[in-house]
Image (cartoon, rainbow, N blue to C red):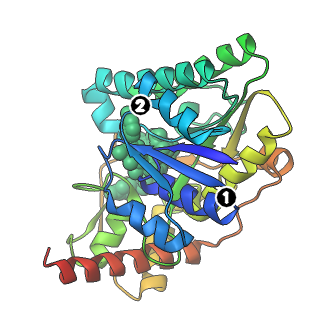
Amino acid sequence: MNVLLTGGCGYIGSHVAVVLMSAGHEVVIVDNLTNSRRDVVDKIAEIGGRPPSFYQGDVGDVEFIRDVIRRHRIDSVIHLAGFKSVGESVQLPLKYYQNNVCGALGLLQAMEAESVSNLVFSSSATIYGNPQYLPVDEAHPQHVINAYGRSKLHIEEMLRDVCISRPSLGAICLRYFNPVGAHHSGLIGDHPRGIPNNLMPYVVQVASGEREFLNVFGGDYPTPDGTGVRDYIHVMDLAEGHVAALNHLSLSTGWHAFNLGTGKGYSVLEMIRAFEGGSGRAVPYKITARREGDVACAYADIQAATLGLNWKAKRTLEDMCSSAWFFQNHLSTRRQGSGR
Ligand code: NAD
Ligand code: UD1
């Protein structure tokens, strides 16, 4: 299949690219590199044994996307391009609506004009808000509390409407829980610009000595050890979920949503311990105030994805920690080599 992968130079997109390539698909990446680096394309090529096609450009640019679709006879689109910082979305909501919602709108217009009728979209478990029950299934009420989450919800709703108006369209919203880890080669992984917002990249930087200690946001949650519990999923398992979604679309049309998680929650302290075990490095931490907007505990009901997509996460917490650490070591070696 010829697959247009938007945001393919990013953390998740680069892993989706290598999994698609190893499943025999032709991958065409569109990324404007606002949160990624051009050399990721070379790393994907190194892992995949052949280069993906790459275009630097904006997903909301309808004529540009139409041209890419025609040129590569695109059958299916996996849409990951978007901004993802919750804190920034609270400060700059219009930036998020412009890029995420208008970007998806432009992409959908281009797909409709070129009669492309399969779409996989990267949504987020953030749309469930504070869980009313656990595990969180796809029917859980939605309650977004920031512009980032609302941008995801708007896109999901836009896709519902478009599926009703175009019965030939198939759209799958994948609601990711907490992707962590990296490809086993150490060539691609989570490489955020600036101070990491998410737990795992911060832990990695503390272990490597780039940062002094980790702030554990809250030690008084109603969880077994008082710290927040999340459903961490290996990014390669998550990437494989996208191939499963594409397979599902070859047999179905209409709108669907699936959680991508493991169904198991780990606390921040459990993550620290697992990472220390996997890396052999200490991760000093201080328990500080809760982070605004955080929930105590969230993990996925994975039944729908298991049955509907015939997909299940199979990598362990140890794999997640050791691959993240291996990627960090590769990064440090490359930086030393380039004098950065
Ligand atoms: P990322 O920032 O690493 O990757 C996103 C990529 O999209 C970047 O390469 C960026 O340059 C590109 N991009 C952004 N806006 C663009 C535009 N208008 N046109 C073209 N390219 C554009 O983020 P990620 O962690 O890989 O996340 C990928 C997607 O998954 C995002 O939509 C994100 O909201 C969603 N998601 C991520 C997580 C997570 O924990 N990482 C969780 C839930 C959902
Ligand atoms: C966050 C976002 C979510 C987004 C996801 C992926 C918030 C409120 N939620 O999810 O919308 O989809 O990232 O981008 O920002 N933690 C620490 N110290 C840190 C960092 C995190 O203790 O330095 C804790 C958090 O309090 C939480 C856990 O680690 O309990 C996981 O945090 P994080 O990796 O940021 O993911 P989420 O908050 O689940």
Residue at the image position 25 percent from the left and 55 percent from the top: 193
Q: Within 8 Å of ligand 2, the CB of disc 2?
A: yes
Q: Quadrant of residue 340?
A: bottom left
Expressed as whole percent of the image width and height from the top left, the position of residue 230 reads 55, 54
Give the residue at mark 1.
240
Of labels 2 and 1, earlier in sequence is 2
Q: Quadrant of residue 194?
A: bottom left
Tags 2 and 1 in contact by the CB under 8 Å rule? no
**Residue at disc 1, secondary structure:** helix
The residue at the far left in this view is 339
Expressed as whole percent of the image width and height from the top left, the position of residue 102 reads 42, 21
Closest to the observer, 127 or 11: 11
Closest to the observer, 207 or 239: 239
What number of labels is visible? 2
Which labelled disc corresponds to residue 209? none
Give the residue at mark 2.
148
